[in-house]
Image (tube, helix red, strand yellow):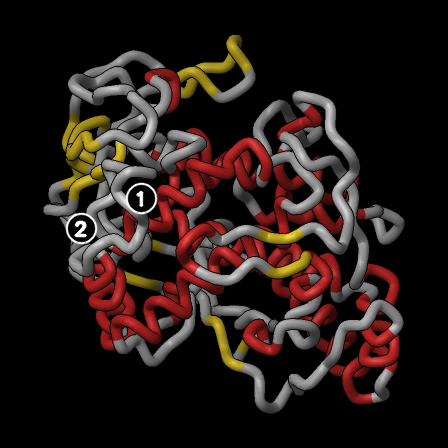
Amino acid sequence: MRFSLGSSLLLLSSAAAYTPEPTDQTDAVAAKSFETLKNAVADGSLKKELATRGVSQECTIANAAVRKEYADLSDAEKTDYIDAVRCLMTKPSITPPELVPGARTRYDDFVATHMNLTRTIHMTGNFLSWHRYFVYTWETALRDECGYKGYQPYWNWVKSSMDPIHSPYMDGSPTSQGGNGVYAPHKCTPFVNNSTLCIPQAEGGGCVETGPYGVITANISATSPTFFPDSGDVPVGPMFSYSPRCLKRDISPWMTSQWLTDNHTMELFASPSHDIAVFQDLLQIDQPQGPICVHSAGHFTWNGDPGGDVYNSPGDPLFWLLHANVDRVWWMWQNQAPIERSFSIAGTRTMANEPPSANATLDDLLDMGFNGDQSPVREHVSTVGGAVLLCLRLK
């Protein structure tokens, strides 16, 4: 996989002039990582390394599919992606209703899988590989079931770090991924695992009424009242029950301007000696500035229901753009040294090792529920090797 570097052109949203933030530092890392990957593929050294663990490499840079930055898509490409997402929201669920009574659509099948596995796919040794495969199964459903011709776009959170509300991702225009929620007074939102941090109220809090998802519902019940603004009627549980409600957001420039900047993201790549454990911790647990990391800051950018609910978070369509970029930064880290880092794995099989569990291994199976086949971690550590389905690159 390789990712397009994007541009710093002046963009106009439907609401106000929007200027993306420069991405020079992280773009440079991405460009260098891509060159390193190309060289490792061209000279055969990556193929040789993958073969030592029984992983094949059939993919080449030339035949790999392309994932692009969402803001760089044409309006037609954005509309094609949105139409495919909405298509999954209309197709019937394939999850047995006795397992997840609240799942009514194919979109819900992905939410249900994430909910069911939450405590074994976050702050674990398989966090990165599981979510890489999860985004792929989603992308495959868009293409195979809804006729989508493109590939999953990503959200370069650096670009919108100073002005997410007017960005092409969240400005509420027809080609955005939906706008802010209507204003609804609420208390600050407690941040996950940190009782002393509370995200200040911004300009939203209520139902999203602008953009292509203004009429969608989150069908599966919420899991906790602490994961979204206290702005009214968001029912909690029973787990997996049917609880239709609107999509709510309170987009937070307070969050993005501190934790999703170019400088902050660069901390993921600051030291060439970082091992995978350090990289994962910086990505999903802690950063020097405080308890928020780029992964959690991404989720709490829209800070609502279901997007801010750790279990239900795929219910907000922005989830998929966020996690495509999480996969991108892992790809950037891996391909700083693709031979040495291809099979790097660290962590246990339970969230923050609670309850204590064995260390994750390359042979552990990644479970996609009813959305795809189980597959071992080793088949998803390289985007040009292993499962050929992950033959991806950037423009």
Give the total of numbered labels.
2
Element under disc 2: loop
Vertical arrangement, residue 205 with respect to residue 321, above or below: above
- In the rendered image, the quadrant that contains the N terminus is bottom right
Vertical arrangement, residue 358 with respect to residue 345, above or below: above
Q: Mark 2 points at which residue?
A: 213
Residue at x 84% of width, y 68% of height: 53
Image location of residue 2, percent across then percent down: 60, 72
Element under disc 1: loop
The residue under label 1 is which amino acid type? Asp
Q: Distance between the residues labelled 1 and 2?
A: 9 Å
At label 1, counting other C-alpha atoms closer than 10 Å, the crowd grade (few under 14, some 14-19, many 20 or more) is many
N-terminal of the two: label 1 or label 2? 2
* 361 vs 340, nearest the viewer: 361
Q: Is residue 124 left or right of residue 277?
A: left
Q: In this view, does 366 lie to the left or right of 159?
A: right
Is the residue under label 2 in contact with that under label 1 (CB below 8 Å)? Answer: no
Residue 163: image quadrant is top left
Residue 33: image quadrant is bottom right
Q: In this view, does 235 lie to the left or right of 386?
A: left
Image location of residue 177, percent across then percent down: 27, 54
Residue at x 52% of width, y 9% of height: 196
Q: Name the residue under label 1.
A: 316
